[in-house]
Amino acid sequence: MRTVALVGSSGGGAATLGHTDPQDLLRRIAAELGKVRGREETFTRPDGSSPCVSIRHALFLSLHGGAGLDTADPETSMATLYAIGCGTEKDDSESLHIRSVVSGRLCKVNETYRLLDSNFVGPSILSGEIDGLILISSDPGGVNAVTISEAARAGIPVTGSGGSS
């Protein structure tokens, strides 16, 4: 099975892009990835289908109230960081474990984001656990710098959407 990492945020125009429900967005992306088929199908689900792509790690920051990051104040804007596979949850390809990691002022949430980006996603790319990277309104010069740098070093495919992605 191929695995991908996903990093990003609700972006500047969150209300128009449908990123106001981060858990739903991550579930929908996982569902679409589950439809991808490849030549080497080594995993079979109870229904007989064989997904070839799954999310190994995801970090997604969302501002409260559907606000966009273009006008956010790091000291006063409130945000929540959601994660998949960046901690203690079991590695289970059958289910998607999306958890809220931290909520609070954007500046504090970004600190946690940088830690998880550096300690989980980046190292997983370098170790060969990640086959591709999806960026959604990412921050290549900020909280996503390590992941994007490691993806370039590893030479994995990267795709994305959003102004900075």
Image (tube, helix red, strand yellow):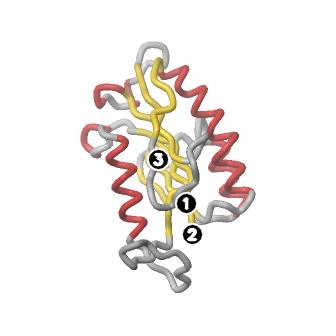
**Residue that mark 1 sits on:** 4
CA gap, disc 1 and disc 3 = 15 Å
Dot 1 amino acid type: Val
Picture quadrant of residue 28 = bottom left
CB within 8 Å, label 1 to label 3: no
Dot 2 amino acid type: Arg
Residue at 59% from the left image edge and 43% from the top image edge: 86
Residue at 51% from the left image edge and 57% from the top image edge: 55
Residue at 36% from the left image edge and 43% from the top image edge: 23
Q: Quadrant of the N terminus?
A: bottom right
Q: Can you tell which of label 1 and label 3 is closer to the viewer?
A: 3
Q: Can you tell which of label 3 and label 2 is closer to the viewer?
A: 3
**Residue that mark 2 sits on:** 2
CB within 8 Å, label 1 to label 2: yes
Q: Earlier in the sequence, mark 1 or mark 3?
A: 1
Nearer the observer, 151 or 127? 127
Picture quadrant of residue 113 = top right
**Residue that mark 3 sits on:** 97
CA gap, disc 1 and disc 2 = 7 Å
Residue at 29% from the left image edge and 31% from the top image edge: 66
